[in-house]
Image (cartoon, rainbow, N blue to C red):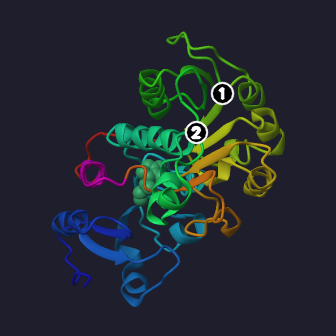
């Protein structure tokens, strides 16, 4: 149920999904209109669009110019997520709309899932689970041997906060690290490669932790996958848009790469069905930050950015 207009509190549009307790907290702070999906235009949204001063939305929600134009008094778009590639930041900046995100609080959980995917794919954790449940262990004996992370080379595309935490975890499992960023980091001694292709050629596991958006669109294409090679694995905890999915499906079906662990897809929730039969692929429903603890912290930070704005204070996490 959406609230009846309360002009004492700033009117905020909240786009789902978000934890119910974050929605409850937001309702305490704001005159809240809840939109089940950014494409929907229910009556309470249409009738109150002129009053909306802020939006709270998942990082992947498409908050484009067409949506923002419907809210002429919009002042701030607060992303519930570190990625803000769903927001048209050019429109926002041109119209004096601040954009914020929720960095840091999700770094550990996202890196944890990246490491979990590396282990799951190399050590065939999901295959092993199916092997036991289907009775194949009893019928056929032990399953085939799998690959150790130890001694393998991890190449990280986008060595920011999440990439660095993934690197630390991978080092604990005996992997060596190298990376590709837009520019080399002076504060780190990991070997740097000037592009994704060169990095893919020089690693066994290519992990994507870079931002989505135009700058990284299909950065991992057929050529990069060919460079990764038949013994190479791809891990994506960034955005589906970073990978040419058709090329990835082809590489996996022709075994020109060894496997993939994917938490994100180009057209979520529609992961390519062509991947479903493959044992050398582990799929997740975009859940890297989805622990109770992290999602609570993300919700709190989203609300903090909004309340700071409405109180005229500096924004904790302004990105545009
Ligand atoms: C969330 C994310 O899935 O932070 C991001 O960029 O993709 C994730 O943490 C999403 O924003 C939550 O709605």
* Front-lying residue, 283 or 74: 283
Dominant secondary structure of the magenta stretch?
helix
What residue do we see at 47% from left, 84% from top?
41
**Which residue is the site of mark 1?**
182
* Front-lying residue, 242 or 64: 242
Q: Are marks 2 and 1 in contact (CB under 8 Å)?
A: no
In which quadrant of the rendered image does the N terminus lie?
A: bottom left
What residue do we see at 64% from left, 34% from top?
206
Is 299 one of the magenta-colored residues?
A: yes
| Rendered view: 268 above or below 287 | below
**Which residue is the site of mark 2?**
146
Q: Report helix, strand or loop for mark 2.
A: loop
Q: Where is residue 101? Give x, y as percent.
A: 40, 47
Q: Where is residue 278? Give x, y as percent.
A: 66, 59
Ligand 1 is within 8 Å of the C-beta of the residue at disc 1: no
Q: Earlier in the sequence, mark 2 or mark 1?
A: 2
Task: Using the numbered discs, state the Cα–Cα distance from disc 2 to disc 1 in whole angstroms.
Answer: 34 Å
State whether residue 257 appears in this view.
yes
Q: Give residue 54's quadrant in the image.
A: bottom left
């Amino acid at each position: 149920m959406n609230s009846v207009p309360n002009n004492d509190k700033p009117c905020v549009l909240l786009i789902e999904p978000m934890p119910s307790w974050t929605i409850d907290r937001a309702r305490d702070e704001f005159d809240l209109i809840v939109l089940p999906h950014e494409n929907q235009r229910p009556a309470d949204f249409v009738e109150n669009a002129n009053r909306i001063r802020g939006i709270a939305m998942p990082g992947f929600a498409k908050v484009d110019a067409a949506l923002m134009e419907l809210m002429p008094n919009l002042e701030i778009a607060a992303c519930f997520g570190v990625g803000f590639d769903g927001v048209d930041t050019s429109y926002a900046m041109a119209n004096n709309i601040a954009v914020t995100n929720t960095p840091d609080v999700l770094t550990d959980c996202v890196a944890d899932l990246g490491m979990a995917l590396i282990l799951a794919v190399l050590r065939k954790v999901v295959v092993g689970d199916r092997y036991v449940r289907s009775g194949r262990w009893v019928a056929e004996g032990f399953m085939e041997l799998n690959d150790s992370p130890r001694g393998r080379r991890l190449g990280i595309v986008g060595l920011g906060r999440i990439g660095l935490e993934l690197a630390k975890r991978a080092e604990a499992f005996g992997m060596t690290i190298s990376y590709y960023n837009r520019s080399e980091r002076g504060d780190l001694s990991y070997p740097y490669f000037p592009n994704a292709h060169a990095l893919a050629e020089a690693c066994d596991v290519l992990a994507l932790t870079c931002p989505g958006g135009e700058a990284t669109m299909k950065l991992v294409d057929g050529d990069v996958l060919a460079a990764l090679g038949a013994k190479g694995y791809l891990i994506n905890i960034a955005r589906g848009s970073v990978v040419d999915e058709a090329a990835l499906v082809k590489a996996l079906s022709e075994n020109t790469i060894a496997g993939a662990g994917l938490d994100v897809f180009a057209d979520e929730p529609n992961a390519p069905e062509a991947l479903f039969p493959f044992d050398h692929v582990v799929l997740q429903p975009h859940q890297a930050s989805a622990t109770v603890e992290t999602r609570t912290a993300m919700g709190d930070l989203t609300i903090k950015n909004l309340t700071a704005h409405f109180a005229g204070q500096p924004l904790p996490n302004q990105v545009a």
